[in-house]
Amino acid sequence: MDKPVTPKIEKPSSGSSQAYDTRPDYDRSPDEFRKANPDNEFVGASGVLFEQAMAQTRMAICLSDPHAPDMPIVFANRAFRELTGYDQDEIVGRNCRFLQGPDTDPNEVAKIRRALETEDVTVVELLNYRKNGETFWNALHIGPIYNQRGELIYFFGSQWDVSDVRAARAEELYAKEMARELSHRMKNMFAVISGIVNITGRMRGVEDEAREINHRVQALGRAYETTLDEASSGDIEIGNAIRAILEPYDLGTGRLQLQGNGLKVPFNVVSGVGVTLHELAANAEKHGAWSTDDGIVKVAWQAEGPDDRDLVVTWSESGGPDASHPSADSGSGNAIIDRLIKHAEGTITREWRPDGLEVTIRFAAK
C-alpha cells in the first residue's frame, strides 16, 4: 500500500505575510501600516514580531503621527476596532478625539494634551464613546516612540475598557458612604437610648440598674461601630468587634490577652458576641479574675464547623478567686447571655473551676 502523500506547505520568507493573509482571522492592519509608512517601517525580525504582537494582542493599540497635521492615527489593531466599533478606514487618518463626547472630562483631556506637548508618558481614565453611541471608561496609556537616532516618530496609545472596574469602585465607595451615614445614625440612636434609660432610671429611683443597662447598650454600640464598613459585604472581621467591646477593660497591663486573626463571620453574630463578652467582662471585674491584682483573662476566637463558617469564642480566666461556686449576683447576666445565644441558635458551655471560669461559645453560621 502506498503511503499517503503529505502536501508540502511553503513557509513564508521573513517579513512576508502572503501565506497567511487569506485567513479570515488575519489582521491586515500591519500590512496597511507598512504600505502607508515605508520610511518608518519596523524592520528586521524584531520588527515583524512587534507588528504581529500589536496586531494579535487583546489590548487595544493605536499609533499617531506627531508630525502630520492634527496628529492623526496611522495604525489601529483589531482590538482597537472591536473596542470602539469603528472600521479601519473610519479610524486611520483621524485624531483620536473622535472617541470623546459631551461627558468626557476636559481636565483629563488637558492631561493628554500636556503629555503630547512634553513628549511624556501618562495614564488617564476618561469617558469615551463607541460608534453606536455607547459610553465606556477608557484607561488610556500614552507614550512617545523614538527611532534609533532619538527622533520622535509616533505616539503610542493603549486603551483598556475599565467600565466594570469603575462600576465596582463606585459601588464600593457608595457602600462606604452609606456605612458612614449609618454609623452616624446608630451613634445617635444609641445616645437616645442611653438618655431614655438614664431618665427612666432617675424617675423610678433605679439609677444603678439604668447604669448597668447603659453599659450593655454602649458595648453593643462599640461592636457595631467597628463593623459597619464591612456590613455591605455580608461578612465582618470579628476580631475588630471583639477588641472594641473589650477595649474599656484593657488597662495595658497584660491582664487581657487576645488570640485571634482576621477571621470573617456573618454580620448577624455581632450582637450576640457584643453582649456576651460585655457580661463576662463585667462579671470578671466584680467576681472573677479582674477582681484581683493578678488575674488574667484570655479571649480566643477561631473558625470551626462546615466550611469553617462557625465562630467559636473561648473565654478563660486565671489568677482570680476560686470560681467553683459562682456568685448569685451573676445570675441576671448569665440569663441575658443564654437568651441571646439561644436566639442566635448558638451554644454555650461554662466550667466553674478553682483556677477560674472558662466559657466556650459557638455561633453557628446562618
Image (cartoon, helix red, strand yellow):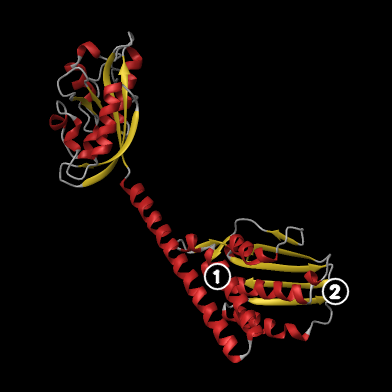
Label 1 amino acid? Gly
What is the distance, in whole Å, between disc 2 and disc 1 at their CAs?
31 Å
x%, y% of residue 292? 83, 70
At 19% from the left and 39% from the top, the residue drawn is 100
| Whether residue 22 is situated above or below residue 318 in the rendered picture | above
Q: Position of residue 145 (x, y in %)?
A: 31, 19
Taking depth in this image into account, of 129 and 88 the one nearest to the observer is 129
Q: Is residue 115 left or right of residue 81?
A: right
Q: Is residue 230 left or right of residue 330?
A: left
Instruction: Identify residue type, mark 2.
Output: Pro
User: Circle 2 sits on which residue?
Assistant: 321
Q: Is residue 5 visible?
A: no
Q: Is residue 86 left or right of residue 259?
A: left
Mark 2: secondary structure? loop
Q: Are marks 2 and 1 in contact (CB under 8 Å)?
A: no
Quadrant for residue 259, please give it: bottom right
Q: Earlier in the sequence, mark 2 or mark 1?
A: 1
Residue drawn at (72%, 85%), measured in percent from left and top? 331
For image coordinates 22% across by 20% down, the residue present is 66
Circle 1 residues within 10 Å: few <14, some 14–19, many ≥20 = many
Q: Hey, which quadrant is residue 338 in on the image? A: bottom right
Using the rendered image of the protein, determine whether residue 306 is visible from the camera's viewpoint.
yes
Question: Which numbered circle lies on residue 221?
Answer: 1
**Residue located farthest toward the top when viewing the structure as drawn:** 149
Where residue 101 appears, as percent x and y from the top left, is 17, 42
